[in-house]
Amino acid sequence: MLDTIRIEKIIAGGAGLGRRADGKVILVPRTLPDETVRVRETRKFRGHSEGELVDILERSPDRVEPPCPMYGLCGGCDFQHIRAEAQIRIKGEIVTEALSRAGLAPEPGVRQPAVAAPQPFGYRSRIRLKLSEAGGIGFYRSASNDLVELRSCPVAADPLNELLNRLLATGIARRLKGDISEIELQHSPADDGLFLLLHPRRNKKPDPAALGSHCMSRSELPPIYLAGGDRLALISGPSGQKTLRQAVAYNRRHDTCVLRWSPNCFSQVNAAQNQRLINHVLEAAAPLPGKQVLDLYCGMGNFSVPLACRGALVTGIELNPEAIAWARRNAEQAGPGPHHFRAGDVQTMLSNGTMSPEPPDIILLDPPRRGVGHPITRLADLGADKIIYVSCDPATLARDLALLVRNGYTLKNVTPFDMFPQTHHIETVALLEKN
């Protein structure tokens, strides 16, 4: 049975929301506001259902032809059918709705326009491809474990697509298929270095030497690592410390520091937009000379090091000890100080009161998608003048902001960043000031 509905809006997650004749909400991917569409219900839930697009009866002027021939099959992108300017507008609206749902009603002008990415395609410096048991390489279909094989990805940087074709030409995937479930391709923004990471199948502990025998004498491939827990094992390629790098400007004179990290550390996948994100954080935190800054979830120093270069006294905390080691190296090489980095779980440290030896003037946090939750109320007890929150999930961001507002802070600025064009994902920076 088919339903004809009119799409009201795009919600978090990227689906269009419409209502059937009986008033029940149905969510339909790859639709646009004000479109009239024919849909087929695919799944039922307590308060809504999900459907698939069958036909477009009335098209939005914001609809465009997706450039990728795999769009609609591959589950990687879900916004390629939307004009670039409309993607930016819709993402801003998703952030605004998340704030409203959390009970936040910011003053006019607080929610700033979303910042477009410099490159709508070819921006990703890292892609993680699935490996089928038959040796195929690609991405899963949306909401399934069916593999869509591919030879290129339009949102990946050109060097990664070239590497993917070299990898396919070797036929290595067919020999790795029993032990490896994912192959990760990484590109170093500053020097075009390339890396391959092999991720084992669940409950498999492949022997690095045995895997290396499949990869040796492959001069057309970059260094290949076996991932496992917090450690990487080099199985092919020259030994020695290999790193990825990005040169980051930290002032208006375009003076730069160089961030380095290993393939096992987190980094933003969009280097050009990451620079804009850093610029925004630096301006939100200014003036910085002599200020005590507490950088939570600091990673390898993506924000810590530019902040220190601008004169801040930085304390960085991060769970991954390898990332902390790189943050120390990056800060020491950049030269400014003093700075202090330590490994630890932020939520645990908030709960037991071991967060900061010095009262911070500014707190910066960039948590994972789940956000912080109720422990974030302990941040208010530290008494910082400013809190800068960087988030990749509007819903958990809004929840955490509401907790901070109820504990003595005012929301001054919320700015979405389109870190992931052609997808519904959004990066957002919020600035709060103590009442």
Image (cartoon, helix red, strand yellow):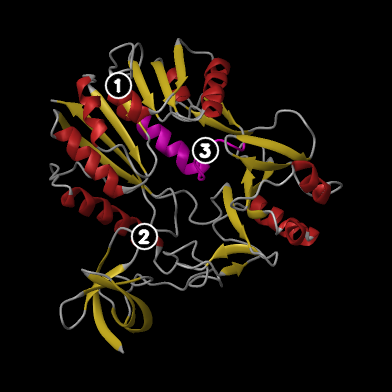
Image quadrant assignment for residue 423: bottom left
Expressed as whole percent of the image width and height from the top left, the position of residue 112 reads 25, 44
The Cα atoms of the two marked residues, 1 and 3, are separated by: 26 Å
Residue 274 in magenta stretch: yes
Q: Is disc 1 surrounded by few (<14), some (14 to 19) or many (20+) residues within 10 Å?
A: few
The Cα atoms of the two marked residues, 3 and 2, are separated by: 26 Å
Mark on residue 266?
A: 3
User: Given the current orientation, which residue lies at the most extreme bottom position?
Assistant: 1
- What type is the residue that disc 2 sits on? Gln
Q: Secondary structure at mark 1?
A: helix
Left or right of 158? Residue 267 is left
Residue on which the image places disc 2 = 87
Camera-side residue: 391 or 180?
180
Q: Is disc 3 surrounded by few (<14), some (14 to 19) or many (20+) residues within 10 Å?
A: few
Mark on residue 352?
A: 1
Expressed as whole percent of the image width and height from the top left, the position of residue 59 reads 33, 79
The Cα atoms of the two marked residues, 1 and 2, are separated by: 42 Å
> What residue span does the magenta drawing correspond to?
263-282
Q: Secondary structure at mark 3?
A: loop
- What type is the residue that disc 1 sits on? Asn
Nearer the observer: mark 1 or 2; the answer is 1
Kindly check if marks 3 and 2 are in contact, taking CB atoms under 8 A apart as contact.
Answer: no
Mark on residue 174?
A: none
Camera-side residue: 306 or 343?
343
